[in-house]
Image (cartoon, rainbow, N blue to C red):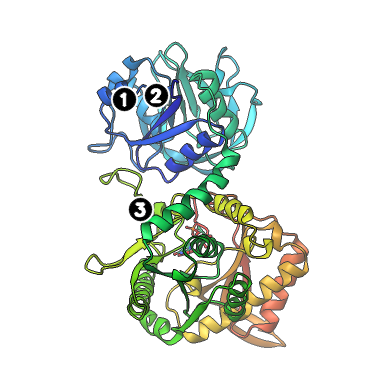
Amino acid sequence: MKKDFILILDFGSQYTHLIARKIREIGVNATIYPYHTSILYIQSIMPNGIILSGGPFSVYEKNPPLISRSIFQLNIPILGICYGMQLLVFLFGGKILPSKHKEYGKTKFFINNEVNNNLLFHEIPKQSIVWMSHYDEIKQITNNLKIIGYTTSSSISACCNLDQHIYALQFHPEVTHTEFGQVMIKNFVFKICKCIPQLKYNNFFKQFIQKTINQIKTTTKKKNVLLGLSGGIDSYVTAYLLHKSIGSHLYCIFVDTGLLIESETKQIILSCKKINLYIKIIDAKQRFVSILNGVIDPEEKRKLIGQEFINIFQAEAKKIKNIGFIAQGTIYSDMIESSIDPQLTKNMNHVMIKSHHNVGGIPKDVNIKLLEPLKMLFKDEVKQIGEELGISKEILYKHPFPGPGFSIRIIGKVNKKKIDILKKAETILIHELKKANLYQHVDQAFIILLPIKSVGVMGDKRTYEYTAVLRAINTKDFMTSTFAYLPYEFLENISNRIVNEVEGINRIVYDITSKPPSTIEWE
Ligand code: XMP
């Protein structure tokens, strides 16, 4: 049987794995290879189509990542996305320059209906919302390319060569916020590359669970496993899978960093009891406050915290006889933003956005291996696996909470006083969201404490206190997000309650930025 599949050449985009996932969702296999894969090799594996991913480069800089023009002679349809588009245009002889009007996030896109037979935009309305993330612009294309789409700030946002089945998009069809992105991917895969669906995505989760349970059993070979539970869905689903697979060989610990609200600790003990899981609580509050003392740089904070988690895990592991593994609930976005992708090529240039606390790895000289069964999944996939496992909605739909906790939500220096301020403010926010029935309508909401003080007036007295930021977002996979459209009355109520009840804050602002260009957390 012919193996229909799409080859993705990776130029270091944050979204490369997302493109593969979107293709698998419609029943077709997608394989990711580094951009410098040889044309001969590509010819030998004969994909139905090739996608050139985005990447953090500019074609006009010194030694940009390129592909050979002989890719056009393979007679295989090609879709270039973002940097992939600029690269295609460049190879055709077009001109790319830094843009005066950079486009990030939500953008209105218009299809140029004058080009007939453009299968990529089949059944897509003339105007729609797309998601952009670029600072270079295509200034000029050659005659053998046709413009098929534009935006208000860029006259060339999509182009194609119909004869050669080559298409290029400046925006990202793979992210959920691009309104008709999945339709464009479907059109490319089925109408242009003529793939025949072979996978059933719905079965993927059932198969994943069974395969993972078996794999854990064979990998661990009756050795004991230590799992760091954080209270979030990723580590809970990991615990559930490990528990099903190796039962009493699993040892769970919860490191109380003091950088989260106390009710979290109680909740985690309760949820472990539900599945008869013993959990040891490690009180590390003092350790974390002292390592953060005087640290301002966000990356330094993240690295110190990641290292401290590893130190604690290692010390605890030593207390367990026959220990072979430390398990973590790492997911794909943790790795790609930290610039670690085990599936992709080792010399690929993924740019580091922020080091997630759980991707520091274990020192090589330690005779313990790392077990991360969810590391190729996105957050919403983990949720679906959780549902398949029968985990309660209360746990599955809890807002995510990052391992470094309040330390990355206190901008600048962290101290006990600021942690206490944030704890109080965050408790009010979560309480009010639930009371107003809004908790489940936002995917993550939290407070950030700025190192900025401003003047206020309370009870006729002058105040000079901190400014706090309310961040509430909507997202599916946490790779892109929009700010949540919370009702004004709710915002007003939150502001009143926090400023009236939390000593140390006298001003609240609402963060209305999307990701990109921002990230969800501030540090
Ligand atoms: P960003 O800020 O990268 O956040 O847009 C995406 C999602 O990841 C969470 N996040 C983390 N989770 N350890 C975690 O367990 C981390 O170091 C970390 N940093 C960010 C963030 O809360 C959001 O849900």
Mark closer to the chain start, 1 or 2:
1
In terms of depth relative to the viewer, which is nearer, 319 or 494?
A: 319
Work out which residue is located at the far front of the displayed protein and give it: 222
- Disc 2 marks a residue whose amino acid type is Pro
CA separation in Å, label 1 and label 2: 7 Å
- Circle 1/circle 2 CB separation < 8 Å: yes
Residue at 46 percent across and 53 percent down: it is 214
Residue at 61 percent across and 21 percent down: it is 122
Mark in front: 3 vs 2? 2
Quadrant of res 220? bottom left
- Disc 1 marks a residue whose amino acid type is Ile
Image coordinates of residue 371 in percent, x first then y, are: 39, 60
Image coordinates of residue 252 in percent, x first then y, are: 47, 73
Does residue 263 appear to the left or right of 12 in the view shown? Answer: right
- Circle 3/circle 1 CB separation < 8 Å: no
Q: Mark 2 points at which residue?
A: 47
Image coordinates of residue 477 in percent, x first then y, are: 55, 50
Q: In which quarter of the image is the N terminus?
A: top left
Q: What element carries label 3?
A: loop
